[in-house]
Amino acid sequence: MHDTILDWEDSLPSEEMQKSELNCKNADLCLCLGTTLQILPVGSYPLLTKKNDGKIVIINLQETRIDNKADLIINNKLDMVFS
């Protein structure tokens, strides 16, 4: 697992974006943890998993723009869910 924080004014690294897109296309499950999925195009990558018959799980305090596509939504703090 790898953690990265991006600010709104940061450009997204293209090599990592390509890898992420490919991984989402091939994944059986996409976990969206602590994000509202607002930064595009990456915020739409979980839909690539869904398009290829995978599942989407979203764990976030707020609603996201793709909640209606998720297979499971947990609106809670990550610390609470993982403890």
Image (cartoon, grey):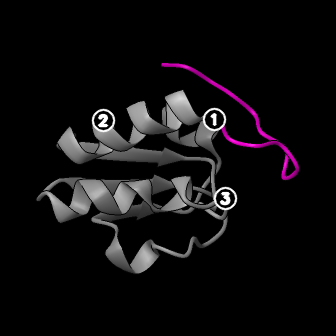
Query: Considering only order in the chain, which callout, 2 or 3, is on the residue closer to the N terminus?
Result: 2
Residue located at (40% from left, 44% from top): 31
Give the residue furthest to the top: 1
At label 2, which amino acid type do we have? Asn
Q: CA distance from mark 1 to mark 2?
A: 26 Å
Where in the figure is residue 36, as x and y percent of width and height?
63, 62
Where in the figure is residue 38, as x and y percent of width and height?
66, 64
Instruction: Give SS at disc 3.
Output: loop
| Residue 53 magenta | no
| Image position of 70 (left or right of 5) | left
At label 3, which amino acid type do we have? Ile
Residue 36 seen by the camera: yes
Where in the figure is residue 9, as x and y percent of width and height?
88, 50
Residue located at (30% from left, 38% from top): 22
Q: Give neighbour class at mark 2: few <14, some 14-19, many 20+ (Cα, 10 Å).
A: some
- Kindly identify which numbered label has been placed on residue 23: 2
Front residue of this view, candidates 55 and 21: 21
Q: Give neighbour class at mark 1: few <14, some 14-19, many 20+ (Cα, 10 Å).
A: few
Question: Pointer 1 and pointer 2: residues touching (CB < 8 Å)?
Answer: no
Report the mark closest to the observer, 1 or 2. Answer: 2
Query: Considering only order in the chain, which callout, 2 or 1, is on the residue closer to the N terminus?
Result: 2
Instruction: Give SS at disc 2.
Output: helix
| Image position of 41 (left or right of 35) | left
Where in the figure is residue 64, as x and y percent of width and height?
57, 70
Residue bounds of the magenta highlight: 1-13
- Kindly identify which numbered label has been placed on residue 39: 3
Query: Considering only order in the chain, which callout, 1 or 3, is on the residue closer to the N terminus?
Result: 3
